[in-house]
Amino acid sequence: MSDCIFCKIAAGEIPSATIYEDEDFRVILDLGPATKGHALILPKQHFADITQMPEELTAKAFVLAKKIVTFMKGALPSDGYNIVQNNGEAAGQTVFHFHIHLIPRYTNDHAGV
Ligand code: 5GP
Ligand code: ZN
């Protein structure tokens, strides 16, 4: 989608702090992190939310979430993780390009996740 910011970021047209990339996804650091290391998994193809995602890509996205969180455990020690995925305005979605939040948690960080 030409007016979608996450399409442009995922395609590399807008620079981002990329921590992982493959043919289907780009993983970036969130511009307004809830905690240190807050990352977002973006598919390179545009899907507004999870209901629009093909099943195989959905599965890949969540397997990748597990892998990145496992990797982050070594690279950025934290005490826990939230894996969050919002669908629809009422659920807190603000960018209508499917994404998964990976949010490292630190004991008593008081992040409003
Ligand atoms: P949502 O509320 O849709 O689940 O999450 C959108 C997330 O995208 C928010 O955490 C917000 O900080 C992040 N975000 C919005 N615009 C940009 C951007 O241009 N670059 C990056 N890296 N993150 C963004
Ligand atoms: Zn998009």
Image (cartoon, rainbow, N blue to C red):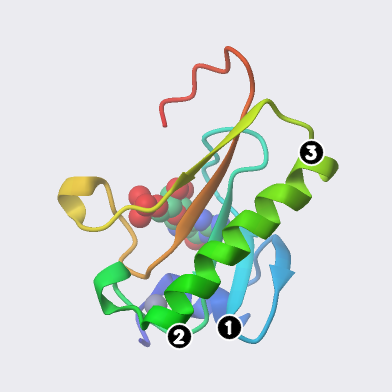
* Picture quadrant of ligand 2: bottom left
Gap between marks 2 and 3 measured at Cα: 29 Å
Identify the residue position indicated by label 1 in the image. 24
Q: As shown in the figure, which amino acid type bears the numbered disc 3?
A: Leu
The amino acid at mark 1 is Asp
Mark 2 vs 1, N-terminal side? 1
Can residue 49 be seen here? no
Whether tag 2 and tag 1 are in contact, CB under 8 A, the answer is yes
- Mark 2 or mark 3: which comes first in sequence? 2
Alpha carbons under labels 3 and 1: distance apart: 24 Å
Q: Residue furthest left?
A: 90
**Which residue does the numbered mark 2 point to in the structure image?**
45
Q: Relative to 28, does residue 58 appear above or below in the rendering?
A: below
On residue 43, the disc is none
Disc 2 secondary structure class: loop
Q: How far from the left and from the top, in percent, is residue 68?
A: 68, 56
For numbered disc 3, what is the local secondary structure? loop
